């Protein structure tokens, strides 16, 4: 890995699910409200975790050619349909199922996200770089007041992260060199993909992404041997490290 020069950075791109927004608590919150309205007893944390766990296998089915390239909204709906009988949600009609699927458009930001992004925006171009489709990312940003300069999605490249085309395509679309584009994520696997594509990387720790962790067990995608150019506790800390 070449020596990192923060003065060379012109733009930052961000993973979104888990890095910018708290998907798990948001889905549990909406699920509990739905369960209360219906009078259902559902293990909503397990539901959220299982829905999210289906994401990578669904993307791999598209990568392998088993299914056509599909937006994340489409992947989420396929996974949801498989969960409905498992969690006793057969009483949802089609309108309710479609609304529940769009919960991913309504996720709450981590408490530091907006303030940290505003600081970073004062010095850099800031953009999403998510597997989430553009409609999802725009709706999420509108609801959560996320101050992006640009919304970039793997949907544009018709690839999913960590395919190199996603990271390289982002640099091309922003008109900058790869070494000028800092990839920010809470997930080592995403950052490893960015490194392989020639981008510098910043890890932002989100220890509560998968809920309370009293045992201190590593997150599902932890890669202990990874090395990143920056490591920050949150977006405000990242802004301070980048002198924004």
Image (cartoon, rainbow, N blue to C red):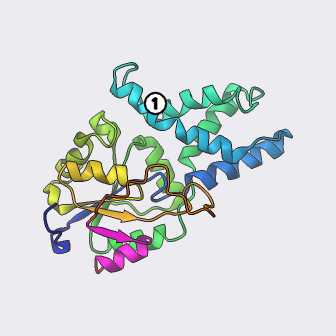
Magenta stretch containing residue 231, yes or no?
yes
Q: Which residues are magenta?
A: 229-242
Q: Quadrant of residue 19?
A: bottom left
Q: Is residue 144 above or below residue 4?
A: above
Residue in view at x 32 percent, y 64 percent? 202
Q: Quadrant of residue 65?
A: top left
- Label 1 residue SS: helix
Residue in view at x 17 percent, y 74 percent? 7
Residue in view at x 49 percent, y 35 percent? 73
Q: Is residue 17 above or below residue 231?
A: above
Q: Say which quadrant the C terminus sits in.
A: bottom left
Instruction: Provide residue 32's location: percent of width, then percent of height.
Output: 75, 48
Instruction: Provide residue 160's location: percent of width, then percent of height.
Output: 34, 38
Instruction: Provide residue 123's location: percent of width, then percent of height.
Output: 27, 74
* 10 Å crowding of disc 1: few (<14), some (14-19), many (20+): some
Q: Is residue 117 left or right of residue 191?
A: right
Residue to which mark 1 is pinned? 58
Residue in view at x 77 percent, y 41 percent? 42
Q: Is residue 126 above or below residue 155?
A: below
């Amino acid at each position: 890995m070449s020596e990192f020069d923060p003065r060379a950075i012109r733009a930052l791109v961000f993973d979104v699910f888990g890095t910018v927004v708290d998907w798990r608590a948001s889905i549990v919150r909406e699920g509990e409200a739905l369960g209360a309205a219906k009078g259902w007893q559902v293990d909503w944390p397990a539901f959220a975790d299982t829905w999210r766990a289906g994401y990578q296998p669904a993307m791999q089915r598209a990568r392998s050619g088993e299914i056509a390239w599909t937006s994340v909204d489409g992947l989420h709906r396929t996974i949801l349909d498989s969960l409905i009988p498992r969690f006793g949600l057969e009483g949802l009609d089609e309108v309710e199922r479609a609304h529940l699927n769009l919960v991913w458009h309504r996720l709450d930001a981590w408490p530091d996200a907006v303030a940290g992004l505003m600081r970073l925006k004062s010095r850099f171009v800031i953009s999403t770089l998510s597997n989430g489709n553009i409609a999802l990312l725009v709706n999420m940003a509108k609801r959560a007041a996320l101050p992006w300069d640009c919304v970039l999605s793997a949907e544009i490249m018709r690839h999913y992260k960590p395919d190199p085309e996603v990271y390289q395509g982002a640099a091309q679309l922003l008109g900058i060199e790869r070494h000028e584009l800092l990839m920010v994520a809470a997930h080592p696997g995403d950052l490893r993909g960015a490194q392989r594509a020639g981008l510098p990387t910043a890890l932002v720790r989100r220890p509560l992404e998968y809920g309370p962790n009293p045992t201190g067990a590593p997150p599902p995608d932890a890669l202990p041997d990874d090395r990143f150019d920056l490591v920050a506790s949150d977006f405000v800390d990242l802004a301070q490290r980048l002198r924004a």
